[in-house]
Image (cartoon, rainbow, N blue to C red):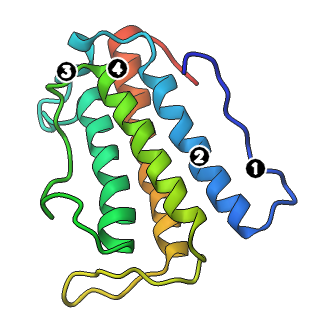
Amino acid sequence: MQNDQRLRPASSADERAMITGWLDWQRQTVPLKCAGLTDEQARRRLLPTSPEMTVGGLVSHLIAVERHWLVGSFLGEPAGPLDDDGWVDDEPLDSLVDRYLRQCEVSRRIVAAHQLDELERYAPEGMPVLSLRWILQHLIEETARHLGHLDILAELLDGRRGA
């Protein structure tokens, strides 16, 4: 997605449209932040104290976040090892972005088939069971936070700002 095709939710949108609209805005920003970067740039480790914090590592982590929260926690289905939080950048950036967009589409289908008040089917022992509403709000927070990281990394890599 080279062009900015993001749409903000309408100011009069209901709760579901508002939550999913803002989450989609964040999701659709990820490819914009990655556009034009080479695989070498996507793997460049710019933060000595956080070597996994690369563009590719962030996209990989966002794939794992979507899969963990909506497939693993909400549906209670196998979503990979519980300790797999992504942070792998040994795959071409275009492939990572494509996998991210496909995982987001899986997430959208899951959300469309359920009510916001529905509870997740899996929560680790000792943790509260969460609603789909809570999970979606958390995904907005998690994705937006990592978009900030992508902003900084992209600017350090090629001087680009914004998107």
Which amino acid does the dot numbered 2 rest on? Asp
Circles 3 and 2 in contact, beta carbons < 8 Å: no
The answer to whether one can see residue 56 in this image is yes
Separation of residues labelled 4 and 1 (CA atoms): 27 Å
Find disc 4 in the rendering and name its residue: 94
Q: Earlier in the sequence, mark 2 or mark 1?
A: 1
Q: Position of residue 14 (x, y in %)?
A: 79, 67
Separation of residues labelled 4 and 3 (CA atoms): 12 Å
Separation of residues labelled 1 and 3 (CA atoms): 34 Å
Residue 1 vs residue 18: left or right? Answer: left
Q: Earlier in the sequence, mark 3 or mark 2?
A: 2
Q: Secondary structure at mark 3?
A: helix
Separation of residues labelled 2 and 1 (CA atoms): 9 Å
Find disc 1 in the rendering and name its residue: 9
Q: Quadrant of residue 15?
A: bottom right
Q: Secondary structure at mark 1?
A: loop
Q: Earlier in the sequence, mark 1 or mark 3?
A: 1
Q: Which part of the image, by quadrant, shows the N terminus?
A: top right
Q: Earlier in the sequence, mark 4 or mark 1?
A: 1
In front: label 3 or label 2? 2
Q: Which part of the image, by quadrant, shows the C terminus?
A: top right
Which amino acid does the dot numbered 3 rest on? Arg
Determine the residue located farthest toward the right in the rendered image: 12
The answer to whether one can see residue 144 in this image is no
Q: Tell me which residue sits at (22%, 65%) in the image.
A: 78
Q: Tell me which residue sits at (42%, 10%) in the image.
A: 36
In front: label 4 or label 3? 4
Which amino acid does the dot numbered 4 rest on? Asp
Q: Which mark is residue 24?
A: 2
Residue 161 position (above or below residue 30) = above
Q: Position of residue 160 (x, y in %)?
A: 48, 13
Separation of residues labelled 3 and 2 (CA atoms): 26 Å
